[in-house]
Structures are given as structure tokens and as C-alpha cells.
Amino acid sequence: MSRSRLGPNRYGKAETHVVRVTRDGDVHHVRDLTVSVALSGAMEAVHLTGDNSSVLTTDTQKNTVFAFAREHGIDSPEAFGLLLARHFVGSQPSVHHARVAIEEHLWDRIGAGRHSFVRRGGETRTALVHHDEQATHVVSGIRDLVVLNSTDSEFWGYVKDEYTTLPETRDRILATEVTAQWRHASAEADWEGSYPEARRHLLDAFAGTYSLSLQQTLYAMGDRLLDGLPEVCEVRLSLPNRHHFAVDLEPFGLNNENEVFYAADRPYGLIEGAVVRDGAPDAGPAWS
Ligand SMILES: O=c1[nH]c(=O)c2[nH]c(=O)[nH]c2[nH]1
């Protein structure tokens, strides 16, 4: 006689990160969701006997999220969740209940930019001071500033060796989480005024640079900050490449002209570099 029974259970694909770009001419709109699906119903057989005949795979659930983003767009997280939940319950006799939990990541336009966005909230301002009898150093900075260009980014012409599979692209999403620090040439500056200026220059350079690589964008951002703030003598940037891969929707009879993306969280490229003003004073311990 069995001494156990199956209690409450559910299963599904957690945290499908879908980015939907809608192109209204050259004005782009972005919806960015993390979608977690959990289904429950007549699931005794799969647990007790290994019979999978009532299982809608979590992989299929993920594909449905991407396909629905393409077919129906994302008007709101609520409407998108309703669409998915009704589909899973309505199309599968074994699925009696669908739970769809959605987190929306909010983006604001950078200035009047048509395809450039900055993630709402979340950034942190930093300051690092060193002082001794010899010298004083001040480094200001920003981190967790997440930005995205939905076009004007290409990546091609790189080395191809026997391990290269990355396809060249003439149009991709370029997104990164900016960590930037800028070293002041003197310990006297308008700290409260220069921070928003520096932030603005970083954002304007990100938005305004037609990018052939994140490395090129990095240099443009550092160079722009040096241009705009004469008292700054060096900028260091750390830019993780937040890869967005266009989802292949052809198996579902749907085209995808850079409208639906899978936002991968790891691994990620990490692009780091310094942009130094000619004649910058010695950094001493400023960065340590
Ligand atoms: O802008 C990029 N720089 C790289 O060095 C690189 N490597 C890669 O796989 N993708 C990218 N993108």
C-alpha cells in the first residue's frame, strides 16, 4: 500500500525575458517583460508514472510567450498575462489553472531620442576621495545606469576562427548597464553641477553614436564626457553587453524583423576601458 500521495503542484517556465520593439516609422517603442508561467491541473500521471502525455513543455510555454509578443504585441502586462493564461487553459484539456506572473522593466526615452532609452530609476551616484600630505584625488561616478538603443548598432567584420558561430549583424539592440567613473584634475569643482552634466553627456553619447561595437560606444561616451567637463581628466567605463537575441519565430510561421528579442542575462560580454585627456596629471592612488 502506498504511504504517500501527490499534493499541490505546478510547473512552468520561469523568467522568460522578452523585449518587444514596435517600430512606428523611425520612432520605436519598447516593452520589456519578465514572464513566469506556472500551470496546474491533471498532472498525476507525469509525477506518478512518468507518462508525459499531458505535459505542455516549459519550452513550449517560453516559445508561446515570444510568439504572442510578436503576434499580439504587448499592450500592458495585465493584457499580455490574460492572453497567455487563457490560451494555456483554453488549449490544453490537462491544464486547469494558469498562473502568469509578470514584471515589467520600465524605460524612459533619452531626450527626444527616437530609439534610445534609459531604464527608469535605479542608478547610484558614487564618489571616491583620497587625501594625504602629498595630494588629494576625487573620482565621481555612476553605476546601474541601464540604457538601450533599439537600432543604430551593427557588429561585423570580426575575427572568425574555428570556434566562431556568432552571425554578423547590421541591426541589433545595443544595451548595457553603465558603470562610469571620472577623475577630477583638482579637488575644487562644482560637484553638484557636474554630476548631472556628466550623466547627460554619457546618455547623449550613448544615444547619439551610431555604433559598430560597444567598444566604439565606450570611447565615444568617455570622449564626450571629457569634452563637456574640462575639469575632468580621465574617464573609466565598464560596460556589460546585455545581449538581446532576435528570436527565431519561423517554426511558428511568424517573421521577426527585429521586433521580438530574448534578453539573455549571462554570460555577457564585458567591455572596459579608460579615456584619458592628453596631459592628465598623474592618477596616483585615485582609482584604488
Ligand atoms: O560590441 C561588441 N563587441 C564585442 O567585442 C563583441 N563580442 C561579441 O560576441 N559581441 C560583441 N559586441
Image (cartoon, rainbow, N blue to C red):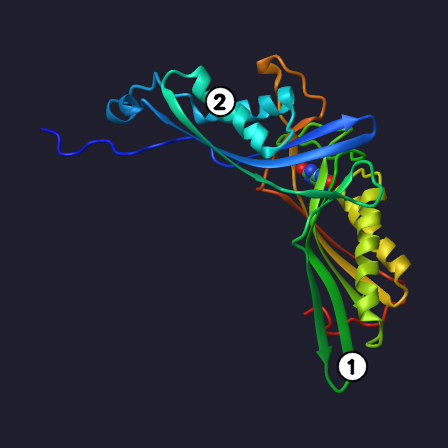
Labels 1 and 2: the sequence-earlier one: 2
Q: Quadrant of the rendered structure where residue 142 is?
A: bottom right
Residue 86 disc label: 2
**What residue is at 73 percent from the left and 84 percent from the top?**
132
**Residue reaching furthest to the left:** 1
Of 104 and 17, which appears nearest the observer?
A: 104
For the residue labelled by badge 1, is the local secondary structure a helix, a strand or a loop? loop
Name the quarter showing ligand 1.
top right
Q: Where does residue 185 sit, x and y in percent of width and height?
A: 84, 71
Left of 200 or right of it: where is 38?
A: left
Q: Where does residue 119 sit, x and y in percent of width and height?
A: 69, 46
**What residue is at 80 percent from the left and 68 percent from the top?**
192
Q: Amino acid at mark 1?
A: Ala
Residue 237's place in the image compared with 114, above or below, is below
Confirm whether residue 135 shows in the render: yes
What residue sits right under mark 1 in the picture? 135
Q: Amino acid at mark 2?
A: Arg
Whether ligand 1 has any atom under 8 Å from the Cβ at mark 1 is answered as no
Q: Residues within 10 Å of mark 2 (few under 14, many from 20)?
A: few
Whether ligand 1 has any atom under 8 Å from the Cβ at mark 2 is answered as no
Q: Quadrant of the N terminus?
A: top left
Q: Quadrant of the rendered structure where residue 93 is?
A: top left
Q: Nearer the viewer, mark 1 or mark 2?
A: 2
Q: Where does residue 105 sit, x and y in percent of width and height?
A: 63, 42
Left of 97 or right of it: where is 82?
A: right
Residue 116's place in the image compared with 61, above or below, is below
Left of 203 or right of it: where is 255?
A: left
Q: Residues within 10 Å of mark 1 (few under 14, many from 20)?
A: few
